[in-house]
């Protein structure tokens, strides 16, 4: 297949590289970053889009996805496919899909989880929204870049699944850190607490797999000075998308709102680039 890939940052570069290494012709374009070795460098949008069977985008924001997609739709032949893997407003996915449809171009929103490590190892989870036949035709490419691919429903539903998941993880991380902070202040051995929670009703991914306390549980960013992992600024971005989506349906998501404030505070205090489990630093410091 001839594949265009736009946005070759932390995520896009390894994803494009994994596609290229399975024998596909992959053409890459980025306004700043250089493509990885296996990806052919394009110097214009025109070059990366024309004559491609499919074009992937992996961009930082809804605004950039809207802008780039408008160009893709103008330059692409009908019956071809655009797949946006960025995390953006579900309404952006719906708007772009509608514009694509007027040119008989297929569109899927396919945000991912798994971070840059998952992108490099080809173990991302894809949450995909859009027509089932387009999804089925694209699935083999998702399976090169990921280990789990879920068709979530109509266009926009991939983005909705993604922000709902991160609402839970964002709030659960704070709850986990508060519990370890309390236990620490009350003198409980935190290894014992981990053992108990891991097998009790308080178990969660943030405790069992990604424990925010250094030296406790399996290896995690906490053991590496909170280097990401998944940075606070990315969690904050996703929680803001979730808040905006909640407002759009008048849902009072109190915990997610509080979690958003929390990560904003941490980001403003200079921790934006640290892993989101660095919430724990507030409680480790308070027990000093
Ligand atoms: P990044 O900033 O490393 O990469 C984005 C790339 O897009 C940059 O290289 C930038 O130069 C390029 N770009 C921006 N505007 C462009 C344009 N108009 N045309 C061409 N290229 C353009 O970001 P990332 O970490 O790779 O994340 C990409 C997307 O994936 C984001 O939406 C993010 O929320 C999502 N995401 C990231 C992670 C993660 O752990 N990094 C995890 C899941 C989802």
Image (cartoon, rainbow, N blue to C red):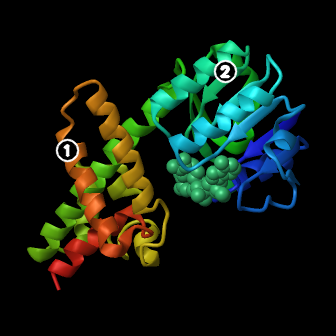
Percent position of residue 236, x then y: 37, 54
Quarter occupied by residue 125: top right
Q: Is residue 130 left or right of residue 270?
A: right
- At horizontal 23% and vertical 77% (from top left) the residue drawn is 284
Residue 116 is at least partly visible in this image: no
Q: Which residue is mark 2?
A: 100
Q: Quadrant of the C terminus?
A: bottom left
150 is higher (above) or lower (below) than 223: above
Quarter occupied by residue 132: top right
106 is higher (above) or lower (below) than 4: above
Residue 107 is at least partly visible in this image: yes
204 is higher (above) or lower (below) than 276: above
- At horizontal 46% and vertical 28% (from top left) the residue drawn is 91
Percent position of residue 142, x then y: 70, 36
Judging depth in this view, the residue of 288 and 254 nearest the camera is: 254
Residue 144's tag is none
Q: Residue furthest left?
A: 186
Percent position of residue 16, x then y: 76, 49
Q: Tell which circle, 1 or 2, labels the residue nearer the N-terminal end.
A: 2
Q: CA distance from mark 1 to mark 2?
A: 36 Å
Q: Which residue is mark 1?
A: 255
- At horizontal 30% and vertical 27% (from top left) the residue drawn is 248
> Secondary structure beneath disc 1?
helix
């Amino acid at each position: 297949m001839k594949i265009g890939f736009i946005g070759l940052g932390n995520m896009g570069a390894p994803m494009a590289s994994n596609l290229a290494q399975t024998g596909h012709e992959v053409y890459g374009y980025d306004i700043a970053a250089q493509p990885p070795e296996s990806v052919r460098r394009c110097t214009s949008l025109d070059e990366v889009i024309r004559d491609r069977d499919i074009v992937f985008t992996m961009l930082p924001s809804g605004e950039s996805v809207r802008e780039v997609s408008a160009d893709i739709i103008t330059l692409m032949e009908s019956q071809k496919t655009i797949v946006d893997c960025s995390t953006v407003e579900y309404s952006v996915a719906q708007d772009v899909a509608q514009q694509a449809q007027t040119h008989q171009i297929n569109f899927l929103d396919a945000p991912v989880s798994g971070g840059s490590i998952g992108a490099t190892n080809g173990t991302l989870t894809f949450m995909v929204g859009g027509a089932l036949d387009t999804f089925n035709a694209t699935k083999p490419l998702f399976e090169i870049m990921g280990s789990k691919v879920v068709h979530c429903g109509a266009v926009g539903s991939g983005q909705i699944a993604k922000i709902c998941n991160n609402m839970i993880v964002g709030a659960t991380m704070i709850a986990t850190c508060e519990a370890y902070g309390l236990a620490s202040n009350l003198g409980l051995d935190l290894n014992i607490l981990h053992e108990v929670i891991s097998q009790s009703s308080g178990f969660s991914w943030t405790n069992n797999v990604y424990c925010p306390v250094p030296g406790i549980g399996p290896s995690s960013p906490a053991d590496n000075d909170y280097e990401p992992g998944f940075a606070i600024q990315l969690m904050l971005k996703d929680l803001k998308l979730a808040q905006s989506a909640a407002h759009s349906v008048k849902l009072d998501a109190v915990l997610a709102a509080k979690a958003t404030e929390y990560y904003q505070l941490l980001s403003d205090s200079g921790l934006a680039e640290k892993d989101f489990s660095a919430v724990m630093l507030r409680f480790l410091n308070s027990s000093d």
